[in-house]
Amino acid sequence: MVREQYTTATEGICIERPENQYVYKIGIYGWRKRCLYLFVLLLLIILVVNLALTIWILKVMWFSPAGMGHLCVTKDGLRLEGESEFLFPLYAKEIHSRVDSSLLLQSTQNVTVNARNSEGEVTGRLKVGPEGALFEHSVETPLVRADPFQDLRLESPTRSLSMDAPRGVHIQAHAGKIEALSQMDILFHSSDGMLVLDAETVCLPKLVQGTWGPSGSSQSLYEICVCPDGKLYLSVAGVSTTCQEHNHICL
């Protein structure tokens, strides 16, 4: 240990310093200095590596002031350019494509779109799978069509199927036939108008046929008769109408 000596003197008396004077060195020397430099060098290397990784991540993820990659942040919301993959459910208020392109949704399995109310209950659901598109409730669209050279089929396995439009429903097949099948009744109702069957040939193969009457003709000519409830049946054609002769079919 260093022993310090304190000397007091009065004014006018000169006292010489002792010859053995201790000199204090200020600083870090030896192995401590080398460890400090090594630690500073290690921190510098870590800082450079972190900076390089940050720049690499920004470049790979395409970060920019406008957004990230194909995802751009605008004043109206988010704009997504190109193709994107969603691994979890997507919740959005509105999804639409650009004016000059269509909106394409692809999935290796099914594509399900749910509409919920303010309480979180599902009010509508659209499910697209190998069997086609499944709507749990009503759907409103100006046009329903199939791909080229493919059949279009509208069916309701457990409920009824209805098509309503304020200005009419137009069904057209350019290169095929239109077929309507039902386990019960098929109703065509017009509240203000008429039902027109405009075709070269109208076939009703399973109409009930009346028996031959006394005034029967040898020719296979029939007339179509209508019951008060709308039921159709065939009656052998004569000089005048013969529907009254077979009106028992309406009973």
Image (cartoon, rainbow, N blue to C red):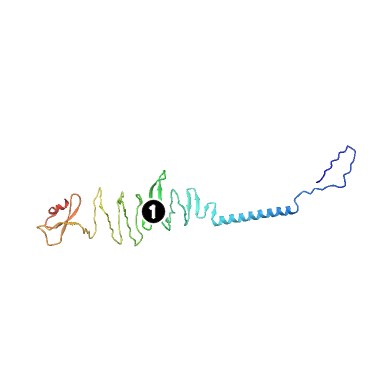
For residue 239, above or below residue 166 = below
Which residue corresponds to the image point at 50% horizontal and 50% vertical from the top-left?
A: 73
Which residue corresponds to the image point at 38% horizontal and 50% vertical from the top-left?
A: 125
User: Is residue 68 found left or right of 226 in the rendered image?
Assistant: right
Which residue corresponds to the image point at 56% horizontal and 55% vertical from the top-left?
A: 57
The residue lying furthest to the top in this view is 10
The residue lying furthest to the right in this view is 13
Q: Which x, y percent locates residue 94?
A: 43, 49
Number of numbered callouts drawn: 1
User: Is residue 220 found left or right of 49 in the rendered image?
Assistant: left
Q: Which x, y percent locates residue 204?
A: 21, 58
User: Is residue 229 found left or right of 11 in the rendered image?
Assistant: left
Nearer to the camera, 148 or 139: 139
Q: Quadrant of residue 17?
A: top right
For residue 6, above or below residue 82 = above
Q: Which x, y percent locates residue 211?
A: 13, 57
Nearer to the camera, 28 or 70: 28
Which residue corresponds to the image point at 36% horizontal and 53% vertical from the top-left?
A: 134
Q: Quadrant of residue 155?
A: bottom left
Tell me if mark 1 has few (under 14), some (14-19) or many (20+) residues whose alpha carbon lies within 10 angstroms of its own: some
User: Is residue 64 found left or right of 218 in the rendered image?
Assistant: right
The residue indicated by pointer 1 is 127
Q: Amino acid at mark 1?
A: Lys
Q: SS at mark 1? A: strand
Q: Which x, y percent locates residue 15?
A: 89, 41
